[in-house]
C-alpha cells in the first residue's frame, strides 16, 4: 500500500546557509521511497511531530498549506488505488508533483487553467457542462503522463473520429452531445461503410471520456447527456476465433529449430495457453518474483483489469519457465521471457512502440507455425485466449468458472468468447433433425 507523509529532510547536504532544512512529502511505494520538495524551509527547533511550531513565522497558514498538499497526495493514493498497483514509486511521485503544481485539491475537482478549462459553465437550460475537446485533450495528456498509452490512444482515436464527423466547432460541450447526435454519427459511420468493431470502439471511447468528465467535474448524472439514452452496440462476430484442442496440440508439438524465432514463439504460446490464456502483455511483463515456490504457481496483476491472478503452473509450462529462468535470480524483478529487453522498460513511448512490434512478430510467427502444421486459420494471441475458453466449455466447465479463469468483469464478456461454441451446438441440433 502506498503511503505519504510530511518530513523535515535533515540531511547535511540539503541544509541551507541560514541553517534551515527543506520540508518534503515522502512518498513510499513498491519498496521504495522518493521525496517531493515543497519549497518550504524550517529550522530544527521550528518542526515537531510533522508540523511547524510557533517558532516559525506564519506557522498556522503554512501548516494549513502543507496539510492541504498532504491531503491532496493522500486523495490521489485513494482515488487511484487500482492504477497505482501497476506504477513504480517514481511514477506515483511524479504524478503527485503534477497535481500539486496544478493546485488541484478535493479529488482534482479544481479546474485546470493551464489546460484551457477555466471553469464549468451552465447552458441556457440550466445544465452544468464542460467543453469536450478541451477536456479530452487534457485527459489524453493525463493518461500519457501515467504511461497509460493504450487508453490515451483509444481516447485520441475517438475524439479524432468525432471531430472529423461533426459540423460543430471545437467549443462543443457535453450537453450538446445528445442521443440524436450520437445516432446520426453512428449512422454516418455505418454508411461509409465501416466495420462495427471500429465504430463501436469510437463510441465507447467517447463515452469513456464523457463519463470521466462527469465524475471529475461532478456534473449531474441526470444532466441529459446523450449516452444516458444511447446504447453502444456489441460488435458482431465476423469469424470463428477459436481452435479445437487437436489443432492447438498440433501447433504445440510440431518440431521446430531450437532457439529460432518461431521456436521461442511456440514455447511462449504454450505458456500463454496453459496459464488460463494469459494476455500477451502480461506474458511479456511476467517477472521472476511472480513465480511461487518451485515453479508451482504464478501470481500477477493483469494489466488490463488490474485483477490479481493466482494460477497453477501446469503441463509443459514448468519446464519452459525453468528454461527461461536460467541464470536469473528467484524473487527478482527480472523479466522471465526475452520479449522486451530490460533496458527499454520504463522508457515511455519507446517501450510501447517496441512492445507493439514484438507482439506483431509473435502473431506473425504463430501464422508461420500454423502454415507448417497445414492449419488454414488466422492464428493470433487472441485466438489462443479464445481457444482456452472454448476448450473449457467443451470440457463441460460452467460459464461462471470460465469467466473467473479468464479474468472477465462479467459472464456476458465471457459469452462473447463462447459465441462460436454456442453456434456450433445450435447448428448440430438443426442438422440432427434435418431431412
Image: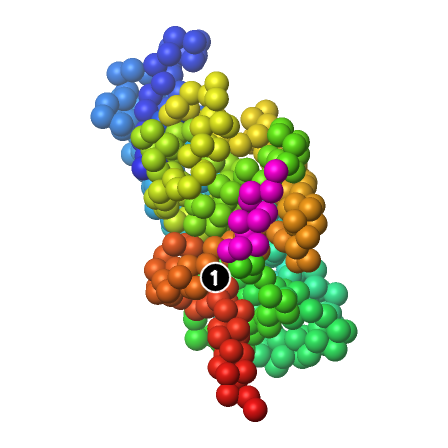
What residue appears at the point 41 percent right and 11 percent down from the top-left corner?
A: 15
Q: Residue furthest left?
A: 49
Residue 309 position within the rendered picture, expressed as x and y whole percent measured from the top left: 37, 46
Residue 32 position within the rendered picture, expressed as x and y whole percent measured from the top left: 38, 25
Q: Residue furthest bottom?
A: 435
Residue 284 position within the rendered picture, expressed as x and y whole percent measured from the top left: 54, 38
User: What are the residue bounds of the magenta stretch?
Assistant: 245-255
What is the secondary structure assignment of the residue under circle 1? Answer: helix
Magenta stretch contains residue 253: yes
Horizontally, residue 213 falls left or right of residue 80, namely: right
Quadrant of residue 174 within the rendered picture: bottom right
Rendered image coloring scheme: rainbow
In the rendered view, tell whether residue 410 sits above or below residue 58: below
| Residue that carries the numbered disc 1 in the rendered image | 390
Towards the viewer: 269 or 145: 269
Quadrant of residue 394 within the rendered picture: bottom left
Horizontally, residue 72 falls left or right of residue 251, namely: left
What residue appears at the point 37 percent right and 65 percent down from the top-left corner?
A: 396
Give the number of marks.
1
Task: Work out which quarter of the rendered image holds the N terminus and state it.
Answer: top left
Towards the viewer: 308 or 366: 366
In the rendered view, tell whether residue 255 sits above or below residue 222: above
Task: Work out which quarter of the rendered image holds the C terminus and state it.
Answer: bottom right
Does residue 256 appear in this view? yes
Towards the viewer: 54 or 124: 124
What residue appears at the point 54 percent right and 83 percent down from the top-left corner?
A: 431
Classed neighbour count for the residue bearing mark 1: other residues with Cα under 10 Å, few (<14), some (14–19), many (≥20) = many
What residue appears at the point 68 percent right and 52 percent down from the top-left corner?
A: 374
Amino acid at each position: 500500500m502506498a503511503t505519504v507523509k510530511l518530513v523535515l529532510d535533515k540531511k547535511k547536504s540539503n541544509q541551507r546557509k541560514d541553517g534551515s532544512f527543506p520540508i518534503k512529502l515522502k512518498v513510499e511505494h513498491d519498496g521504495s521511497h522518493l521525496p517531493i520538495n515543497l519549497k518550504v524551509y524550517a529550522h530544527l527547533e521550528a518542526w515537531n511531530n510533522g508540523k511547524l511550531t510557533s517558532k516559525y513565522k506564519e506557522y498556522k497558514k503554512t501548516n494549513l498549506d502543507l496539510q492541504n498538499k498532504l491531503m491532496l497526495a493522500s486523495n490521489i493514493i485513494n482515488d487511484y488505488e487500482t492504477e497505482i498497483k501497476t506504477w513504480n514509486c517514481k511514477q506515483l511521485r511524479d504524478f503527485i508533483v503534477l497535481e500539486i503544481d496544478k493546485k488541484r485539491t478535493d479529488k482534482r475537482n479544481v479546474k485546470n487553467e493551464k489546460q484551457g478549462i477555466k471553469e464549468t459553465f451552465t447552458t441556457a437550460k440550466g445544465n452544468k457542462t464542460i467543453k469536450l475537446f478541451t477536456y479530452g485533450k487534457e485527459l489524453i495528456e493525463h493518461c500519457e503522463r501515467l504511461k497509460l498509452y493504450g487508453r490515451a490512444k483509444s481516447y485520441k482515436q475517438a475524439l479524432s473520429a468525432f471531430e472529423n464527423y461533426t459540423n460543430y466547432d471545437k467549443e462543443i460541450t457535453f450537453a450538446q452531445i445528445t442521443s440524436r447526435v450520437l445516432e446520426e454519427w453512428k449512422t454516418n459511420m455505418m454508411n461509409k461503410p465501416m466495420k462495427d468493431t471500429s465504430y463501436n470502439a469510437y463510441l465507447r471511447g467517447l463515452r469513456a471520456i464523457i463519463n470521466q468528465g462527469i465524475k471529475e467535474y461532478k456534473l449531474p448524472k441526470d444532466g441529459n447527456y446523450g449516452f444516458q439514452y444511447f446504447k453502444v452496440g456489441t460488435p458482431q462476430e465476423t469469424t470463428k476465433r477459436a481452435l479445437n484442442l487437436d489443432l492447438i496440440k498440433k501447433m504445440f508439438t510440431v518440431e521446430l529449430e531450437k532457439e529460432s524465432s518461431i521456436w521461442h514463439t511456440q514455447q511462449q504460446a504454450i505458456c500463454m495457453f496453459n496459464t488460463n490464456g494469459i494476455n500477451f502483455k502480461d506474458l511479456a511483463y511476467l517477472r521472476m518474483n511472480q513465480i511461487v515456490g518451485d515453479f508451482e504457481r504464478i501470481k500477477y496483476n493483469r494489466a488490463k483489469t488490474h485483477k490479481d491472478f493466482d494460477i497453477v503452473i501446469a503441463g509443459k509450462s514448468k519446464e519452459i519457465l525453468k528454461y527461461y529462468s536460467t541464470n536469473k535470480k528467484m524473487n527478482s524483478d527480472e523479466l522471465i521471457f526475452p520479449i522486451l529487453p530490460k533496458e527499454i522498460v520504463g522508457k515511455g513511448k519507446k517501450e510501447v512502440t517496441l512492445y507493439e512490434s514484438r507482439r506483431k512478430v509473435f502473431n506473425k510467427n504463430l501464422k508461420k507455425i500454423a502454415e507448417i502444421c497445414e492449419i488454414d486459420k488466422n492464428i493470433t494471441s487472441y485466438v489462443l485466449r479464445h481457444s482456452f475458453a472454448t476448450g473449457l466449455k467443451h470440457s463441460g466447465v460452467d460459464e461462471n468458472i470460465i469467466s473467473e479463469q479468464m479474468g472477465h468483469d462479467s459472464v456476458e464478456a465471457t459469452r462473447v468468447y463462447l459465441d462460436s461454441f454456442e453456434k456450433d451446438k445450435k447448428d448440430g441440433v438443426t442438422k440432427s433433425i434435418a431431412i
